[in-house]
Image (spheres, coloured by chain):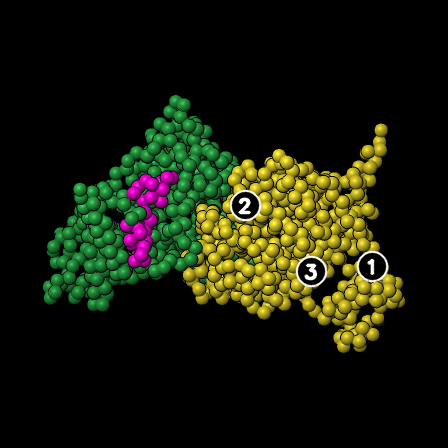
Chain colours: A yellow, B green
Amino acid sequence: MDAAYQRIADDIARLINSGHIAAGSQLPSVRELAAQRGVSATTAVSALRVLEQRQLAEARPRLGYFARRAPAPMAEPQFRPPQSHSRAVRISDVITQMFPGEAPSPPRAAPLGAALPDPELLPIQALQKATARLARTRPQLLSGYGPLDGSLRLRRWLVAHYLRCETVLDPSELLITNGGMEALELALGAVCQSGDSVAVESPCYFGFLQVLETLKLKACEVRTHPRSGLSVEALAEVLQAPGGERIKACLLCPTVSNPLGATLPDADKQALVALCQRYGVALVEDDLYGDLHYAAQRPRPLRHFDARAEVIVCGSFSKTLAPGARVGYIAAGHHVERVRALKFATSVSTAPLLQAALAEVLEGAVYVRHMRRLRQACQDQVEQVMGCITEHFPPETRVVQPSGGFLLWLQLPAGSNSLEIYRAAISEGLEFAPGALFSASGQGFADSLRLNCGHRITPAMQAAVARLGALCRQHLAQSQSASHSP
Amino acid sequence: MDAAYQRIADDIARLINSGHIAAGSQLPSVRELAAQRGVSATTAVSALRVLEQRQLAEARPRLGYFARRAPAPMAEPQFRPPQSHSRAVRISDVITQMFPGEAPSPPRAAPLGAALPDPELLPIQALQKATARLARTRPQLLSGYGPLDGSLRLRRWLVAHYLRCETVLDPSELLITNGGMEALELALGAVCQSGDSVAVESPCYFGFLQVLETLKLKACEVRTHPRSGLSVEALAEVLQAPGGERIKACLLCPTVSNPLGATLPDADKQALVALCQRYGVALVEDDLYGDLHYAAQRPRPLRHFDARAEVIVCGSFSKTLAPGARVGYIAAGHHVERVRALKFATSVSTAPLLQAALAEVLEGAVYVRHMRRLRQACQDQVEQVMGCITEHFPPETRVVQPSGGFLLWLQLPAGSNSLEIYRAAISEGLEFAPGALFSASGQGFADSLRLNCGHRITPAMQAAVARLGALCRQHLAQSQSASHSP
C-alpha cells in the first residue's frame, strides 16, 4: 500500500496542492517520470493514474497528463444554536433501522456509512500472526478469565503511550473493556444517576446518544464550532444560568470529534477542565480518534490539563488497529472502584487472548510506522472525497475541514432532507449517516450528513460518491419545485 | 484424564458406595486387581491410591487396602424464609473486596472460590487449534465488527443444541454476547425500568444481585428448596398478596442453580411459566449450568414450557468450554428488537474470531465426548469434596446434594459466621464464597458458604478443604465460648 507509484503520486500531489505546479500545466511524461525517479514505465503510469483518480490530473489524448485546478476550498457548515435545555434521548429506533443485525441488502455499493478504516490500512497481518502464535502457545489465555482489570502489559503500554502526549495515567486506574462503547457506558454509569443531564456536543456522535438513552440520561446539546469543537462559552452560559438545570457530566470528543473532526484548542481544553471542576461537572473524554489527528505530534488530551485525575478517559483500538478485536479502555481516575464494580457486573472481564495479541502488535516497531501511514492515508482520502463532493454535489454544499480522522460532515443547501435522501440511496446500496442521527430528538441536522472516508478511494467509491451527489441534486430540485408549486 | 486406573477406581467406588463392598472388608490386592482387569501392577496401584484419596479406601501396612465406611449422607441445609418485600440491592462493595482487579495475594491455596471448572477438564487444545487456524486464515475476523447479532453459525448451533432438549429457538431471536453476564444485563434492561422489583431465588447468585444493583432494580427474594429450587407456591403468594407490590420480572436458574445446584421439577417449571404469564411477569432464565445436569438427558429449560416465546433464555460457554472466550448468548424471544438496540449501544458486537473458533469446536465430535466426561468429573469431584467435609468440618454441617454442576453449598452449625471465617482463611490464601454474597442486603446466610468443586481433587485441594474445616471448627469453638462467657 506504500508502493513506489503511490509515493511518486503523493509527491506530485503535494506540488499541485501547494501551487508549485500550476493548474493546467503539463506533467512529466511517462518516460520522463520513469527516468527522473528511476522506476519502470509501468510504475510511472500507475502514479499518473492515481493522480487522475484523485482528480489532480487529467489525461488529454495524445498529449499526456495535465495538472488540474485544485478545487476551491468549500464553505464551512453553519449551525443553528441548539435548544438550551436538556431533553430525553430517543434515537435507538432510528439507529437500529440503519444498522440491521444481519448483512445489508442490497449489497453495499461503498463503505460510506459506519465510521471504520479500510482493513487494508490496518496491520491485520501482524495481529493475525500474534493471535495465532498466542492461541497455540498460551492455553491460559482461553481457559481463564484473566485479570479482571485486563492485561497489565496492555495497560502499561497505554501508560507509556499517553506519556508521549504529556499525560500521566496510572496502570491501577486503567481497565480494559469490550470496545470503546462499554468504556463510555461504564464512565457515565459511574458518575450519573438515571434522569441526570449530560452536556454533549451538537452535532453529537449517535453512539453517545445511545449510551445516554440506555442509561436514561438527558442530553443537553451545546453549541459546537465545526473546527474548534464544543463552545466552552456556551457551556459556561448553561452552567451559570440562574435557576438553570444541574448538569451532572459532560461527554465529548475533545481531540478529533465524531462527526465533525473538530479539535478543541489547548486554551479551551484548559478552560473546560477548570469550568467543570468549578461547577462539579464530571468530564468524560472520548479519545477514540485522538491518535488520528493529522499533526505530526497529536494534541494533548483533556486529562493533561487536569491535575486532579477527575477526567475519565475512554478509548479503543477499533479505529486504529482492529475493530474485530473489540478491545477498548477506560482510565477512570478517582472513579476506578465504582467503574470496576460496574465492569465486573456487566461482562466480568475482556477476552484475554485478544488483549495479549494487541499488546504484542502495539509494542512492535510495525505499529509506529503503521500509524504514520494511516494518518496520511486518512488525510489523503478525506481530500479526495472532498474533491468528488465539489464536482458532484449541489453547489453551495458546505463541508467541514476535519483536523484528523476519516469522517466528513456535509451540510446540503437549505431545503434538503438527508433522511429522505437516505431512503432513496439505501435502496441502491448507498449508505451514509444522515444528520438526524446526531441530535437527541432524532430531528435535528436534517440538511446534513456524515460520510466515512476511511477506505481507499477506488473507482467504485468515486462512483458511489458521485451517485450520492446526483441523488442530493435530484432531491433538492424536487423539494424546490414542490415549495414553489401553488 | 480418563485413564484405565481411573475407570477401575470408579468401578470399585460405585461398589463401595452402593454397599456391595462392605466397609472394613479387604479390597483386591495389587496382583489380584492387575490380573482381574488385565492391567499392569502400576495401573492397579494407581487405582487403589485414587480410592484412598477419595477416602473410600485405607491402606493398612503389610495388609493391603480396605474399604472405608461410606460417609453417612449429610443433612440438607435449612433456610429461614426470606423477607417478603423487595429491597434495594447493596452487594457490589462486598463483592469487589473479594474479587480484586489484580491477582490475589497471598497466592491461592486452592481454587475453591470462583465458580470455574478445571482448565484440564476443558477442550482447550481443540479451541487453541481452531483459534490459531482461523486467526491465520480469516483476516476479516479481526478487521471487522462482524454481524451485530453474532456468528450465524454459532447461533445455528445453539438452535440445534436446544432442539435436543425439545426447545425451539429461532436464529433471529438469538444474539451473541460478551459472556453470560452481558446477556443477563440486556435481558433485564429490556424488560425492566429503574426502580422495578425482580423476584429471585434465595440464596441468590451474587452475579444476579450485581446486575440488579447496576440497573437499580429491587430484589424480591423468594423461598427456595435446596433440591427443587424456587418455591413457585411462595412466588404465587407474593404475586397474589392483596395490595402487594408489583413484580416486573423473575430472574432464576431453573436447571442446576448457583449456588444450590437445585433443579425445578418439570411440573414446577410449567406452573412457573403459567403463573408469570397470568401476572404479566417477565421470565429471565439463566441456563448457564443446564448442560451440566448429572442426568444422561438434561432436563428441559423453562422456555420449553412457554409456547409464546416470552421466556428470555441466557447462557454462555464459560462453564463448559472456555471462560476466556468471554462468549455468551441471549434468546430474547419477543424482546429481540429492544435487546438488539441495547447490545448495539453497550458493546456493538462480540469479537468475531472467538465466536468462529467456538462454533468450530462445538460442531466437532470432540465436544459431545467432552461434555460426557465433564459431567462425570463434576459429579465425582463434588462427591470427593463432600467426603472431605464429612471428615474435617464441624459435625452438624449441612450440605446440599446438587443435581448438577460443580458447586457445593454448606450450612455451618448455628453461631457460625462465614464472613469472619473468610477473613481468617483469605490471609492463608484459602478462598471460598461466603453466604453473605447471596442475599440482597449482604447480611443473609451468615452461617453458609459456597465451595467451587470444579477442579480436579489433588492432595493440595484436600489439604485446603481440611484446613478450611479446621478454621470453621476453631471459629465455632471461639464463638460458642464467647456466647457462654459472662
The residue that appears at 56% across and 45% down in the rendered structure is A280
Range of residues picked out in magenta: B421-446
Same chain for mark 1 and mark 3? The answer is yes
Check disc 3 and give the amino acid type: Tyr
The residue that appears at 74% across and 40% down in the rendered structure is A80
Residue A280 highlighted magenta (yes or no): no
Question: The residue marked by circle 2 belongs to what chain?
Answer: A
Quarter of the rendering occupied by the C terminus of chain B: top left
Residue ranking furthest to the top: B242
Residue B432 highlighted magenta (yes or no): yes
- Residue marked by disc 2: A188
Q: CA distance from mark 1 to mark 2?
A: 45 Å
- Asked whether the beta carbons under mark 1 and mark 3 sit within 8 Å of each other, the answer is no
Quarter of the rendering occupied by the N terminus of chain B: bottom left
Residue A268 placement (x, y as % from top left): 67, 52
Nearer the N terminus, badge 2 or badge 3? Answer: 2
Nearer the N terminus, badge 1 or badge 3? Answer: 1
Which is more toward the observer, B90 or A303?
A: A303
Visible in this render: residue B329?
A: no
Disc number for residue A70: 1
